[in-house]
Amino acid sequence: MGLNRKPKAAELLSGREGKQPNHNKKPRLKTVDLGTFSRRRGLSMEMHRNAWDAEEMAILSGKPGSCWVAAATATNYPPLEGSIHADAVVVGAGIVGLTTALRLCEAGRSVIVVEGLRTGGQVTGRSTAKITTQHALIYRHLIDTFGRDLAQTYADANSAGAVQIREWVRNYAIPCDLEAKDAYTYSCDASRRTQIVAEAEAARQVGLDADVLERAPLPFETAAALRFFDQAQFNPAMYLVGLAQAVTARGGRIFENSRAISIGEASRWRVVTDSGTVHAEHVVVATNMTVKSPVGMANRTQPRCHTAMAFRIDDPLAVDGMFIGIDDPTHSIRTGRDAEGPLLVALGPKFDTGQDGDVAKRFVELEQWARMSLPVGDVAWRWCNEDYDTADRVPYAGEPDPAKASGFHIATGFNAWGITNGTAAGTMIADLICARPSPWQKLYDPARSYPEDFHKNGRSQSFVSSLDDIVPGMGGVIVRGDEKIAAWRDTEGVLHPVSATCTHKGCTVTWNNADNTWDCPCHGSIFAADGSVIHGPARKPLAPAAL
Ligand SMILES: Cc1cc2nc3c(=O)[nH]c(=O)nc-3n(C[C@H](O)[C@H](O)[C@H](O)COP(=O)(O)OP(=O)(O)OC[C@H]3O[C@@H](n4cnc5c(N)ncnc54)[C@H](O)[C@@H]3O)c2cc1C
Ligand code: FES
């Protein structure tokens, strides 16, 4: 393993770990309130981003990137080469993939993990990493929709996920800042107190220890709060680095920078990367959104993105607990730390990935809200993260089509609660591979029916009529005949064109002006400014294009 490395200038520009545009330019570290800037120039917020020029380009407060990933040791597993065999191949080294892999290793199975980027740097390493069975308001919904038995199974699966994490942290001595904390769901609106009371009753019906408070222990006014005792929080990137070490210590093999570009069946399952092939009886597609599935998952889910900021705080107990609001706009809050000291992490409300042309504005709003509401200092880190919602708010995990695709397993749709659900899903999949039945199979059934109008494709928000409209640091989509070209202009003014057509199913991408990525408004694929894949379902980069 290499040492934790400092981000390069190009990484500071990109805002994403793992895949970066290949341009070694220094960002101008100038903080501009976008609203003030736009008003000063007499512009609407919608127009402001096209109005920035090279000298006045806004750089948001804080370093791009997740504070958890920054605080974790960077892994350095080799890429896959040649042709190898195992009992199971796991695609993706996030919480689902590494949970599955470790449980299989513990059961004596041979396992290979192929990871497209680096271990733990994606959705898990960019989450708020609350380890809790409190998923905002969920149990009343589950009891009313599916009945008490299924709600009980959801509580059991997530309780077991939380226990599994604590056990592995202890058994494998994983340093990951695991701390016990109470979890709170709060509202600032007195009329929503009845919902909090109803949720507490529903939680108690499925055996969870919940109570209702007059207000949350937060430094701003709230009207009611639901408390779950003795939940936990950790650094998820450090946890995954520890799980990866446990996997390899038990004989599993991990290959990084090894993106699965093809998954198919020969006599066994076959996963192909650029430089190698794995053959196995079982394949587990643990890529957050499935990059391949015998039953399509992209139309059963909706990609949802959040902005996150980590602020410097003097007091590590500036807020004591983990908090999620249920009002609109909603916020999520917890504490943590990086190498330089304690942090307070705040999240903004969700939005459909690739369907907002001004993500930077969301960071400005989040910072303003945090400064008004919480005792925060400078912004240390900022990043976006996405996960997938499902219509019934329950994930999909297991074998989608055991009759036609036996041994093909998936897990997706965690509704931003995949730390415990993802651990439960990975545990369940490993047990099924070991022919041990799981009580959670029906709950997570990936082939269950779904409302076909749940998923909504979006449109690119980045069309420009001329390349001159793309100011340094920004991206825009231009139409040339039948071709749509996505062009990013670097801070020196050089344009970098790639095809704007998403390699998943052909939607046109949107420029994310905070993370400097091309985000697909249909099923949530994310590409770096140079077109390389960061997040699926796409497996292939945006095609090269010329201007
Ligand atoms: C803003 C936000 C906050 C959240 N906070 C919480 C929380 O507090 N508590 C909670 O329970 N849940 C939370 N979640 C949800 C949780 O983080 C996720 O559900 C969970 O981490 C998903 O894990 P994963 O293993 O599916 O995905 P990932 O961690 O993304 O792992 C998937 C891996 O697969 C790799 N991959 C993708 N495609 C390929 C390919 N073709 N070949 C090889 N590898 C590939 C990726 O690079 C990645 O490393 C949050 C989510 C968001 C968006
Ligand atoms: S993610 Fe499906 S078309 Fe882009």
Image (spheres, rainbow, N blue to C red):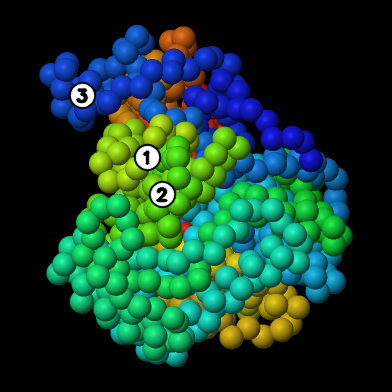
Q: Where is residue 17 shown, x and y percent of the image? A: 58, 36
Residue at 34 percent across and 33 percent down: it is: 360
Left or right: 250 in relation to 255: right
Classify mark 2 as within 8 Å of ligand 1 or not, answering yes or no.
no
Query: Where does label 3 land, which residue?
Result: 36
Q: Quadrant of residue 424?
A: bottom right
| Mark closest to the chain's N terminus, 2 or 3 | 3
Q: Is residue 142 shown to the viewer in this render?
A: no
Helix, strand or loop at mark 2 = loop
Q: CA distance from mark 2 to mark 3?
A: 29 Å
Three-letter code for the amino acid on which mark 3 is drawn: Thr
In the image, which disc is placed on residue 106? none
Q: CA distance from mark 1 to mark 2?
A: 9 Å
Quadrant in which the N terminus appears: top right
In the image, which disc is placed on residue 376? 1
Q: Nearer the viewer, residue 34 or 212?
A: 212
As drawn, 387 above or below 544: below
Q: Nearer the viewer, residue 239 or 461?
A: 239
Q: Is disc 1 in contact with disc 2, using a CB cutoff of under 8 Å?
A: yes
Classify mark 3 as within 8 Å of ligand 1 or not, answering yes or no.
no
Q: Where is residue 437 shown, x and y percent of the image? A: 67, 85
Q: Nearer the viewer, residue 419 or 130?
A: 130
Query: Where does label 2 land, which residue?
Result: 318
Q: Is disc 1 in contact with disc 3, using a CB cutoff of under 8 Å?
A: no
| Mark closest to the chain's N terminus, 1 or 3 | 3
Three-letter code for the amino acid on which mark 2 is drawn: Ala
Residue at 31 percent across and 22 percent down: it is: 32
Mark 2: few/some/many CA within 10 Å (<14, 14-19, 20+): some
Q: Quadrant of residue 10?
A: top right
As drawn, 469 above or below 211: above
